[in-house]
Image (cartoon, rainbow, N blue to C red):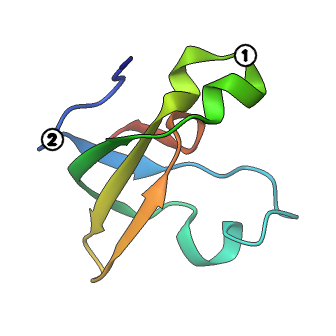
Amino acid sequence: MVNRFEKGDRVRIDIPDKGDLDHEKYHGECGRVVLAMNDDADSETGDPRDEVIYRVELDSGGQMDFRWRDLRPE
């Protein structure tokens, strides 16, 4: 598993594409990584970073899952 972030890391959600359905709801939100899970998306994309989904506990409440490309260090 290729982890860009670890449990406990503070992150900022960065979804610059305004056409993305999650942009309006999550872009600019901050939170803490609470879980890193494996899946097999990397077999579809060819990018080993895509085998990890990060569950983020948002400062505004609730949790959401994101790929590495939607997260930046806070």
In the displayed structure image, the side of residue 23 where residue 2 appears, left or right: left
- Residue at the extreme bottom of the image, as rendered: 61
Q: Quadrant of residue 61?
A: bottom left
- Residue at the extreme left of the image, as rendered: 8
Residue at disc 1, secondary structure: loop
Between 1 and 57, the one lying in front of the other is: 1
Mark number for residue 7? 2
- Which of discs 2 and 1 lies nearer the camera? The answer is 1
Q: Quadrant of residue 45?
A: top right
Examine the rendered structure and indicate whether residue 27 appears above or below residue 40. below
Q: Name the residue: 49% across, 52% down.
A: 66
Residue 49 in percent (x, y) is at 52, 22
Between 29 and 43, the one lying in front of the other is: 43
Q: Name the residue: 15% across, 41% down.
A: 7
Q: Amino acid at mark 2?
A: Lys
Q: Amino acid at mark 1?
A: Gly
The quadrant in which the N terminus is found is: top left
Mark 2 and mark 1: span between their CA atoms?
25 Å
Residue 39 in percent (x, y) is at 49, 40
Examine the rendered structure and indicate whether residue 3 appears above or below residue 8. above
Count neighbours of disc 2 (C-alpha within 10 A) and say few if under 14, some if 14 to 19, many if 20 or more: some
